[in-house]
Amino acid sequence: EKDKDGNWYGVRISNMIIAYNSNKLKAEEAPKNWTDLTDPKWKGKIAMPNPMLSGTAYVAVGALADKYGWEYFDKLKANGLRVEEGNSAIQNKLLTGEYAAVMILEENILKLANTKKEPLKIVYPTDGVINVPSPIAIFKETKNPEGAKALVDWWLSKEGQQAVVKGWMHSVRGDVSAPTGAEETKKIVEGRIKVDWQKLANNNAQIKEEFRKRVMDK
């Protein structure tokens, strides 16, 4: 990912995915795609982070509303969707079994599954993962252009990108492997849900208000 005018480059890729607890659910019982979360069998057992507070959740809301219409969130609300402040509250309640299936950042689940051996599993939705690249850029007013350039060059180097992967996120380079336990980056990116970044930037207040009105208001 890069800006069409070259103002910024993607430096790492986070992914919004579905996760479940394999101690509570078998793989074949888990949701396979985003629309499965509207199934009544998950009523009151699904959650997502708050898009008012989480940038990645905001991107997910915009992408899913574009793909399925705002009615998708009406269906989630009717199915008892809970909105948590952040990813950590969600992962904890997934571990206790309060939630059966959740929308969450892939890196949170990879870290818990691989470093703490927690029984959390990732579903890469068949209708598309939501890719959220983080940008890196140099301010033109910077007092230290050489230092800034050296930092950007390091983060985009193979060594810098391997550091990104150690943080359980995906590299933007083709010669750096995906994090342990993750789907291959190329496959995720090829099947991703299209995100209208310009729309998300221009309509931030409207999109958040639409979500709040439909999902968070009692």
Image (spheres, helix red, strand yellow):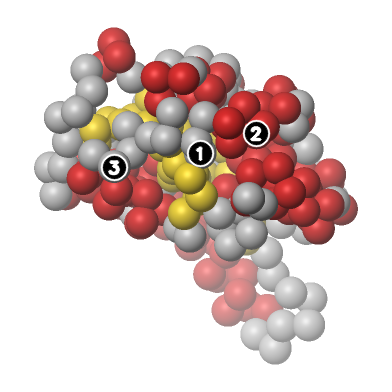
Q: Amino acid at mark 2?
A: Phe
User: Tag 3 or tag 1, which sits nearer the N-term?
Assistant: 1
How far apart are the alpha carbons under marks 1 and 3?
Answer: 12 Å
Give the answer, above or below, for where 210 lies relative to 175. below
In the rendered image, residue 203, in percent from the top left (x then y), is placed at: 85, 51
Q: Are marks 1 and 2 in contact (CB under 8 Å)?
A: yes
Quadrant of res 127: top right
| 60 or 90, nearer to the observer | 90
Q: Amino acid at mark 3?
A: Glu
Q: Residues within 10 Å of mark 1 (few under 14, many from 20)?
A: many
Q: Residues within 10 Å of mark 3 (few under 14, many from 20)?
A: some
Count the marks. Answer: 3
For residue 81, side relative to residue 73 (left or right): left
How far apart are the alpha carbons under marks 2 and 3?
Answer: 21 Å
Give the answer, above or below, for where 214 lies relative to 54. above
Quarter of the image containing the N terminus?
A: top right
Q: Amino acid at mark 1?
A: Leu
Q: Are marks 1 and 3 in contact (CB under 8 Å)?
A: no
Q: Residues within 10 Å of mark 2 (few under 14, many from 20)?
A: many
Instruction: Return the mark for residue 98.
Output: 3
**Residue that numbered label 1 is attached to:** 81
User: Tag 2 or tag 1, which sits nearer the N-term?
Assistant: 2
Instruction: Return the mark for residue 52.
Output: none
Secondary structure of the residue carrying numbered label 1: loop
| 196 or 153, nearer to the observer | 196
**Residue that numbered label 2 is attached to:** 73
Residue 173 visible (yes or no): no
